[in-house]
Image: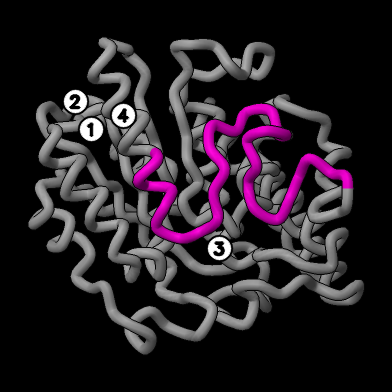
Amino acid sequence: MTNLELQKMANEVRKDIITEVHSAKSGHPGGSLSAADVFTYLYFEEMNIDPKDPKKADRDRFVLSKGHTAPGLYAALAERGFFPKEDLTTLRHIGSHLQGHPCMQHTPGLDMSSGSLGQGISAAVGMALSAKTFGDSFRVYTLLGDGELQEGQVWEASMFASAKKLDNLCVIVDNNNLQIDGTIEEVNSPYPIDEKFKAFGFHVINVNGHDFDELRSAFTEAKTVKGQPTVIIMKTVKGKGVSFMENNAGWHGTAPNDEQYAVAMADLEKAGEALCQK
């Protein structure tokens, strides 16, 4: 896809996110919106996947380590054709396959259940080690929140990934600088994130997480790295695309009411119209 096509799709993913959390009357819009561009790039450009055969053996794997941003992942999966878009309005409803956090037993296209922060990267490391052990060609991607880096398990997994030279592993950090209680510096600063990962033996790439040129370059570079895992640290805006949600920690885990939903969708419709003029 061209960058413009990716931008248009990311805008659709953002509209889906807002629709999901509004329908559920709960959920996590802020971090879903900040990661919408990377979800779009992964599922429409980067990963070797097939919606018609979601369990194919050589597919690339993705683990959403920050599992609370499931609305963003579900939106990308639906847009990519893994299940009907109409299902998105059933988020967090009883009997729905779209639970508040990813559940691999019920949702097509999911490779791992997640939600307890810190655990997803460990699962991804295990998948990457398995591929190395058995000579499989697939790559493994995992998305972490910057607040999640406060979990010790993240660094245990990172140390192991480096020790085992897992160059088929690509860790992505959504650095929107906000978590549920405020800025990550105020809560427990993980900065400098890039230097920490370098110290743990990672190849480090810093990008603007809303720039598809930079994302494309970063993921292309990651595939050339040998002998060590890669981390792509994305500088992003929490709540990206919705005026009243941007850079506002209060929208970490709050659903919009009817009036707010209308404003949010109007923001995104306007953004979509601007993209159509390009």
Residue indicated by mark 3: 31
Separation (CA) of disc 3 from disc 4: 25 Å
Separation (CA) of disc 3 from disc 2: 29 Å
The image quadrant that residue 60 belongs to is top left
Q: Are marks 3 and 2 in contact (CB under 8 Å)?
A: no
> Residue 122 at what x, y percent from top left?
35, 45
Residue drawn at the location 37% of the way across and 47% of the way down = 121
Residue indicated by mark 2: 224
Residue 204's place in the image compared with 31, above or below, is above
Separation (CA) of disc 2 from disc 4: 16 Å
1 vs 3, front mark: 3
Kind of element beneath mark 3: helix
Q: Amino acid at mark 3?
A: Gly
Mark 3 neighbour density, 10 Å: few (under 14) some (14–19) many (20 or more) = many
Q: Amino acid at mark 1?
A: Glu
Q: Earlier in the sequence, mark 1 or mark 4?
A: 4
> Residue 5 at what x, y percent from top left?
59, 33
Q: Earlier in the sequence, mark 3 or mark 2?
A: 3
Residue indicated by mark 1: 221
2 vs 4, front mark: 4
Q: For the view shown, which residue lies furthest in the bottom direction? A: 186
Residue indicated by mark 4: 128
3 vs 4, front mark: 4
Range covered by the magenta-colored residues: 95-123
Q: Are marks 1 and 4 in contact (CB under 8 Å)?
A: no
Q: Main secondary structure of the magenta part?
A: loop
Q: Amino acid at mark 2?
A: Thr
Kind of element beneath mark 2: loop
Residue 172 in the magenta stretch? The answer is no
> Residue 174 at what x, y percent from top left?
41, 58
Mark 4 neighbour density, 10 Å: few (under 14) some (14–19) many (20 or more) = many
Separation (CA) of disc 2 from disc 1: 5 Å
